[in-house]
Amino acid sequence: MKRFFLLILIFIFSGALYAQMRSLSVVYEVEVKYDEKELKNENREERAAYIALIDKKNENKDIYLLNFREGLYSYLVKESMPAQLVINGGIQTFNLSDQSRYIDFNTGESYSIRSLFGKDFTVKERVREYDWELVVDEEELIAGKLCKKAIFREKSGGLVIAWYCPEIPFPVGPNGYHGLCGLIMQLTTSSCRYTATEVTYTNDDVKMGRLKKAKIVTPEEFKAILDKKIAEYDAVVVDE
C-alpha cells in the first residue's frame, strides 16, 4: 500500500511538472526473442522452422502507441501483422499475444478489452506493483536519450530489464510496466524487447476504451470462460 501511495505522488509530481504538455505519446516497436526451449529442440527441422518464423515476424515488428495524461494510461496496437510461412506443405503462423491495455492510476484499476466468439469482455484487475532494483552504475543511450537501468524479477524467475530516462519524468512504460522515475525507453522480457522510437507531447485526451455493453470479469473468470469455449469446440470436433 505504501508503494502505491508513493507511485501516486510520483504521478502527481509528473503531472504538475509537465502540465503544459498535457499528454505524453510514445511509439514502441516490439522485437520477438527466441524461446530458449524451442532453440533446444532436438528436431533440426522443427527448430529451423521456428527460427525462420520468428525472423519473419521481426521483419514486420508490431507497433504500439502509449498515451498518458493525469494518471490515465492507454497502450494500444497501432500496427500488427502475423508472420506466416509455408513449412512442409502447411502454413505456420505466429503473432504476438499482447493486448491493448488501459490503467487508471487514480483508482488503481487496470483493464483490457477482449473479444471471444463475438462477445466483448472488460477484463479488470488491480494495478500491478513492480519491485524494481535500480542499477546505479550502468547507463545507455536509447533513441538519443541517456537512460538508467533497472531490473525486476518475476515470480517465475524470469528477469525484466528496463532502461528509463529521468529526463522524461513520466513513470510509465510499454505493456503496463511502470513505477520508475522516468519513461521506460526500452524494456526486455523473456519473450520480447520493446523499444521507444518516438516520444511526443500533445493536447489530446487519453481515450480509455470503455465499452458499455462489455461484461466486466476478472482474469480468472475470463480464463474459465475461454477454457469452457475451447472444451466445447473440441467436443464438436471429436463428434464430427
Image (cartoon, grey):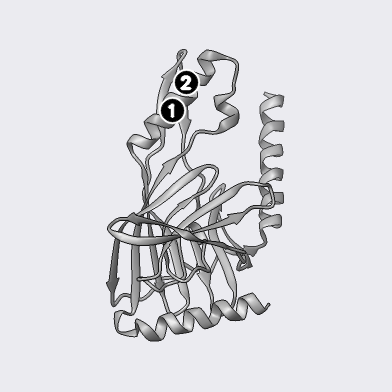
The percent coordinates of residue 41 (x first, y second) are 59, 21
- At label 2, the amino acid type is Ala
Q: How far apart are marks 2 and 1 (CA)?
A: 6 Å
Q: Can residue 109 be seen in this view?
A: yes
Amino acid at the residue labelled 1: Leu
- Residues 179 and 206: in front is 179
Q: Residue at x 67, y 43 (%)?
A: 229
Secondary structure beneath label 2:
helix
- Image marks 2 and 1: residues in contact by CB distance under 8 Å: yes
Is residue 239 rendered to the left or right of residue 54?
right
The disc label shown at residue 224, or none: none
Residue at image mark 2: 49
Along the viewing direction, whichever of 231 and 50 lies nearer the viewer: 50
Examine the rendered structure and indicate whether residue 80 appears above or below residue 114.
above
- Which residue shows up at 70% across the image and 38% down it? 232
The image shows residue 27 at horizontal and vertical percentages of 33, 58
Q: Is residue 174 visible from the viewing direction of this image?
A: no
Q: Dot 2, how many residues are within 10 Å of its Cα: few (below 14), some (14-19), or many (20+)?
A: some
Q: In this view, does 180 lie above or below 240?
A: below
Q: Quadrant of the N terminus?
A: bottom right
At horizontal 39% and vertical 67% (from top left) the residue drawn is 67
- The image quadrant of residue 80 is top left
Which residue, given by chain and number where applicable, does mark 1 sit on? 53
